[in-house]
Amino acid sequence: MTPSIGLRLDDLTHAYAGRNVLDRLNLDVLPGQFVSFIGASGTGKSTLLRLIARLEKPISGTVSPLPHGTSRDVNVRVMFQEDRLLPWWTALQNVQLGLRGRETDARRLLEAVGLAGRESLWPSQLSGGQKQRVALARALIHKPDWLLLDEPFGALDALTRVTAQQLLEDMLRESPRTVLLVTHDVEEALVLSDRVVVLGGGRVLKDLQVDLPRPRHRDNARLVAWKQELLDGLLH
């Protein structure tokens, strides 16, 4: 298995309309860690993922791999809140987007996300949760070093959301990698992550280590206490 690659954010700064949304932000994410970012709207969470994915260029600062000296290119994939499937392609074709000769892998991933037998369906024939499963399979088929998740389950109903979270956790257990998640759901962050980072004022306000064994129960006393602590901090 290819070793995981972490990342370092060094004095990362970015602005829109003259206002800094990220202000000399520094953070290390260790190889194979799952880190969630929470914070009020407008605190730069999605901007941070876009900078890491090289969809935008920072005003200053750098994003670099850990450990330093990594010689190969870092493979980065982003999964958004919108599934962004091509409506004129089937589920199987969408998973293989940009690839050739990977049909076997695509079928295996669709089976892993619970969509065996639905490979030939169009996106219009899939539910919202099923479309997000296709989007997840499409991201994972590339075996990314950095998997960036921008509120991927935000539009799902509560039950489908929990099911999707469990599916993601199961797949990462089978194929660990470095994951960054942006979410407004504090409980989601605590259930899935090794660390929960609170952003505010363009910087890190809190970096919580979630040292609980998996799978995690949502009524775990420590998890409930952390959830209340984080919510109190976000509200006040």
Image (cartoon, helix red, strand yellow):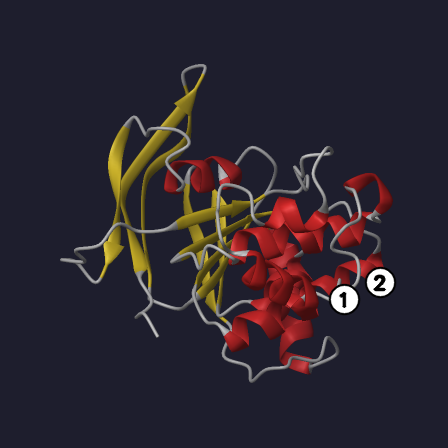
Q: Quadrant of residue 122?
A: top right
Q: Quadrant of the N terminus?
A: bottom left
Using a 10 Å C-alpha cutoff, classify the residue at mark 1 as few (fewer than 14 neighbours), some (14 to 19) or many (20 or more).
Answer: few
Q: Could you tell whether 234 is left or right of 89 in the image?
A: left
Dot label at residue 159: 2
Type of the residue with mark 2: Leu
Taking 112 as reference, is 205 above or below it? above
Which mark is drawn over residue 145?
A: none
Looking at this view, is 235 or 202 the one in front? Answer: 202
SS state under label 1: helix
- Say what secondary structure mark 2 lies in: helix
Q: CA distance from mark 2 to mark 1?
A: 6 Å
Residue shown at 64%/74% (left/top)?
223
Can you see residue 101? yes
49 left or right, relative to 92: left
Confirm whether residue 153 shows in the render. Answer: no
Q: Residue at image x 64%, y 46%? A: 93
**Which is nearer the eye, 192 or 94?**
94
Question: Which residue, given by chain and number where applicable, does mark 1 sit on?
Answer: 163
Estimate the x, y position of residue 44 in percent, counting from the top left.
49, 36
Could you tell me residue 60's position as x and y percent? 25, 30
Q: Residue furthest front?
A: 101
